[in-house]
Image: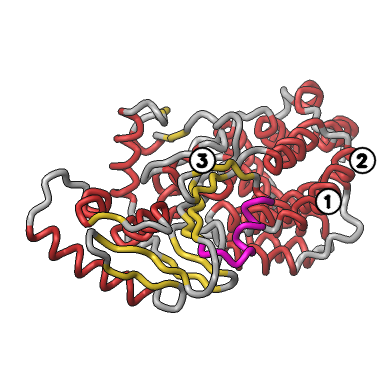
Amino acid sequence: MDALIAAAARALAAGDALGALKRISLRDDPPALALRGIAMAQLGEHRRARELLRRAARGFGPHEELARARCVVAESEVALAMRELGGSPRSLAAATAKLEARADHANALHARLIAARRLLLLGRLDEAAAALARLDARGLPPALAAVSELAAAELALRSLRTGAAQAALARARAAAERAGVPALLAEVAEARAALERPAARRLSAGAEQVLRLDEAEALLASGALVVDACRRGLRVGAAWQPLARRPVLFALARALAEAWPGDVARQALIAHAFRTRRPDESHRARLRVEIGRLRALVAPLASIDATARGFVLGPRGARDVVVLAPPIDGDEASLVALLSDGAAWSTSAISLAMGASQRMVQRALVELEAAGRVRSIGRARSRRWLAPPFAGFTTILLLPAALSLA
């Protein structure tokens, strides 16, 4: 490695992309192309970065497998930043194996972190937890240690374990300070700020209370019957009844919970669940069917009894009924929350993260764009979607597959 390449590499490790480019911007040899690609990625020029990294990988000879594997890892991180999540992870896994075989443990761990972060973006928390558990972070450079702890903190936040998240963020901050990379310090600060922002609203007996993440965690563990409008289901302690794929049943459950301990008139339930202002006999018959289905599903947690004018929810045991409502309402709340991370998402990546069809995602995005809640950049296959970050509260509870409750 010549002196300019070594100096550029040190500048990139310290987060000084412009300093690195000053040394190698006019060079086209494979090591310089790779470093230029990483520098462009740090500056946010992801498409140019990917092009340079691919040229570098093609330029390395057949006996330079280690250098090519490092290019694959860097390109995978660029794809992650671009929210291109639909590609096969096999090339990254193969590069990881080559790095481990050549004893490049730091870059191998970096590759494993990229794979874990991809799983987190897709909401596959169990797989992400398993991937992070397999990492041996001992002896990592401070920058990689900070990234590792940030991933652990994100997993804890999205699993609503605020104590573990705070501990991981404290370790991430210490590692970021040792690394001296401003971007890492800013990322840690943003993650810590999420703990202090409002994350949900508690609706009970006609009153509303704003909750932080730790307060939402305490509410879910309190033993109350919680109708969770963030994850679309009912919870009592460890018992969980998901209703995310049963929107009519969830709408009925939420209406009954918001009125508890009172009842809800049949006409109000019909309007709430079926979205009609002129109910007829068919709607009343359908209401009886849907109430029967809901009663059977929630029987271990609560009863639903008929009254003279409608229906009333009765929790099992002497416990309260609470609605945990998101900070923003609407059927597309999770979609808007996903886009509010500041990155530009493709519809294919959104559909993967949401577990929905691309067609459904495209229709929702068109409606949100017409309402001015999201915007698009580019055209055709290069079209990407983003939403402005929400000021004043966090959307962690709205992220897809945010918590696996068995």
Amino acid identity at mark 2: Arg
Residue 273, image quadrant:
bottom left
Q: CA distance from mark 1 to mark 2?
A: 10 Å
Residue count near mark 3 (Cα–Cα under 10 Å), binned few <14, some 14–19, many ≥20: many
**Res. 327 mark:** 3
Distance Cα–Cα, label 1 vs label 3? 33 Å
CB under 8 Å between discs 1 and 2:
yes
Q: Label 1 sits on what residue type?
A: Ala
Spot occupied by residue 172 in the image (x, y as percentages of width and height): 82, 47
Q: Vertical placement of 195 versus 299: above or below?
A: above
**Chain-order first, disc 1 or disc 3:** 1
Which label sits on residue 221? none
The magenta stretch spans which residues? Answer: 214-225
Q: Earlier in the sequence, mark 3 or mark 2?
A: 2
Marks 1 and 2, the one that precedes in the sequence: 1
Identify the mark at residue 145; answer none if there is no mark: 1
Instruction: Tell me the SS state at disc 1.
Output: helix
- The answer to whether residue 53 is magenta is no
Secondary structure state at the residue bearing disc 3 = loop
Residue 178 is tagged as 2
Q: Nearer the viewer, residue 53 or 181?
A: 181
- Secondary structure of the residue carrying numbered label 2: helix
In the displayed structure image, the side of residue 185 where residue 132 appears, left or right: left
